[in-house]
Amino acid sequence: MIELIRKLSNAHGVSGFEEELREVIKGELEGYADEIRTDSMGNLIATRNGRELELMLSAHMDEIGFVVKKIDDKGFIRIAPIGGWFSQIALGQRVVLYGRQKIYGVIGCKPPHLMKDEERKKGVEISEMFVDIGAKSKEEVLSLGVDVGTPVAIDREVAMLTNKRITGKAFDNRVGVAVAIEAFKKCKSDATIHFVATVQEEVGLKGAKTSAFALEPDVAVVIDSCVAADFPGSENAHMDIALGKGPVITVVDASGRGLIVSPLVLKWLKETAEKCKIPYQLEVAEGGTTDASAISLTKSGIPSGVVSIPARYIHSPVEVVDMNDVENAVELVARAIENARDYFKEVIK
Ligand code: ZN
């Protein structure tokens, strides 16, 4: 499982540019599905055929990143953010630009030595930062296949911490993808299961919208990551979500503007966890949402649930998760899929 997370996290797939990830995930699913296809948005869909009930098991594969916006005459590259960035985190990172081949660079800015006091206090906006790939001119940058629109991803490799905790970039949502892959492989269900690795979640739940519309499943479960509020100074976060206390079952997100999980879906996930003695946490969140919001509003409505893996420092290159939560999430999702028929008989189309 750690090796799978390592492989998925170390790969790059900024929203809208998920090709590398799609190939890695496809390789993992080979032999476990009756059909694997890519739709016109770029979603990867692997279907294992069964009878009557159709279930969608999805996780977004994209990550926040940047695209090249402008290249100056000296070869420095300005970037525009893709997805929700906290600008201070972008500074000082090593990045990969997907030119003709992978080109390495760093995100720099004026050094603090040259800043005025007020400047230092204010912090640096992404628009003031630039990527340095070592090039000496604009022509040299262009000759490497880097141009306006080239995706730029954070480059950071997975490392183990103590207590079965692990750190890396894009754990939102490569850890979720890993859980979905393992649950898809592990579950013994006679229903039809559509595994979907969605694109462009971080920029508006886009891949989920189109794939759910095409598949029109009877029920959907989305695997994502969520904010662990167990960091120092989190006393005012009004949340109890912590690492190591089990996967998180969403009740409400984005203060209800995202998803309000239906009582039946909640009963399904909670009873499965309780029956199988899997620890779990419940989440009511005021910010953030997931692909499930888009899926639940597809066509005449699709009952949708979310199982998340709690992560610290989300949307940074040093996200941290606990492998116990990851393993318990696989177990919960696999068992829930096996149980789904008992709960969703009435909604089968
Ligand atoms: Zn996510």
Image: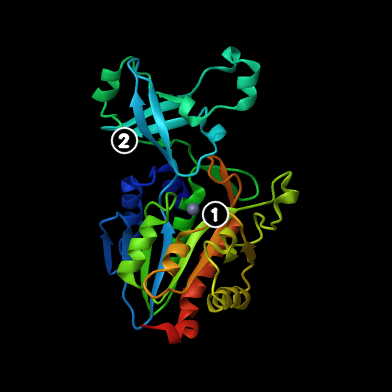
- Judging by the rendered image, the residue that carries numbered circle 1 is 288
Counting from the top left corner in percent of width and height, residue 166 is at: 57, 47
| Figure check: 307 above or below 81 | below
In the image, 184 versus 118, the foreground residue is: 118
At horizontal 55% and vertical 77% (from top left) the residue drawn is: 268
Residue labelled 2 has its Cβ within 8 Å of some atom of ligand 1: no
| Figure check: 100 above or below 265 | above
* CA neighbours of label 2 inside 10 A, class few (<14), some (14 to 19), many (20+): some
Residue furthest to the top in view is 114
In the image, 292 versus 247, the foreground residue is: 292
Q: Quadrant of residue 80?
A: top left
At horizontal 33% and vertical 63% (from top left) the residue drawn is: 211
Secondary structure of the residue carrying numbered label 2: loop
Counting from the top left corner in percent of width and height, residue 131 is at: 42, 25
Counting from the top left corner in percent of width and height, residue 291 is at: 45, 60
* CA neighbours of label 1 inside 10 A, class few (<14), some (14 to 19), many (20+): few
At horizontal 47% and vertical 68% (from top left) the residue drawn is: 221
Q: Amino acid at mark 1?
A: Gly
Left or right of 130, for residue 141: left
Q: Quadrant of residue 83?
A: top left
Counting from the top left corner in percent of width and height, residue 103 is at: 34, 29
Left or right of 328, for residue 107: left
Q: Quadrant of the C terminus?
A: bottom left
Marked residue nearer the N-terminal end (1 or 2) = 2
Q: Amino acid at mark 2?
A: Gly
| Figure check: 216 above or below 310 | below
Q: How is the image coloured?
A: rainbow
- Judging by the rendered image, the residue that carries numbered circle 2 is 149
In the image, 329 versus 283, the foreground residue is: 283
Q: Quadrant of residue 41?
A: bottom left
Secondary structure of the residue carrying numbered label 1: loop
